Image (tube, rainbow, N blue to C red):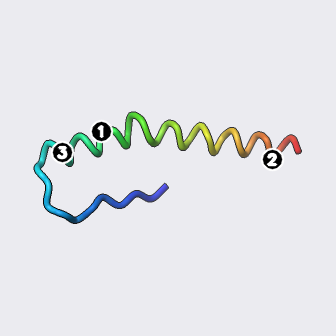
Amino acid sequence: MLIKLSAAPSDHEATLQSIRLLGEEVAPRVRAEVARREAAAASA
């Protein structure tokens, strides 16, 4: 998975919050969806 954060100016706390959300919310959901699709393709 490749994610690019905007290069627009933002404060440090907002950047840390974005990174935290990516790690705690987005990445696990993406991993789960990839695993689900791989399992479905393997059983098809």
Q: Position of residue 20 (x, y in %)?
A: 30, 38
Mark 3 Cα shell of 10 Å, populated few (<14), some (14-19), many (≥20): few
* Cα–Cα span, label 3 and label 2: 38 Å
Position of 44 compared to 36: left or right? right
* Secondary structure of the residue carrying numbered label 1: helix
* Cα–Cα span, label 3 and label 1: 10 Å
Report how many numbered discs are placed on residues in the image.
Answer: 3
Image quadrant assignment for residue 3 = bottom left
Mark 2 lies on residue: 41
Q: Amino acid at mark 2?
A: Ala
Q: Amino acid at mark 1?
A: Arg
Tag nearer the camera, 3 or 1: 3
Along the polypeptide, which appears first: circle 3 or circle 2?
A: 3
- Camera-nearest residue between 10 and 23: 10
* Secondary structure of the residue carrying numbered label 3: helix
Tag nearer the camera, 3 or 2: 3
Q: Position of residue 5 (x, y in %)?
A: 30, 58
Along the polypeptide, which appears first: circle 2 or circle 1?
A: 1
Q: Amino acid at mark 3?
A: Ala
Position of 19 compared to 29: left or right? left
Mark 1 lies on residue: 20
Mark 3 lies on residue: 14
Disc 3 vs disc 2: Cβ atoms closer than 8 Å?
Answer: no
* Cα–Cα span, label 2 and label 1: 31 Å
Q: Position of residue 28 (x, y in %)?
A: 49, 36
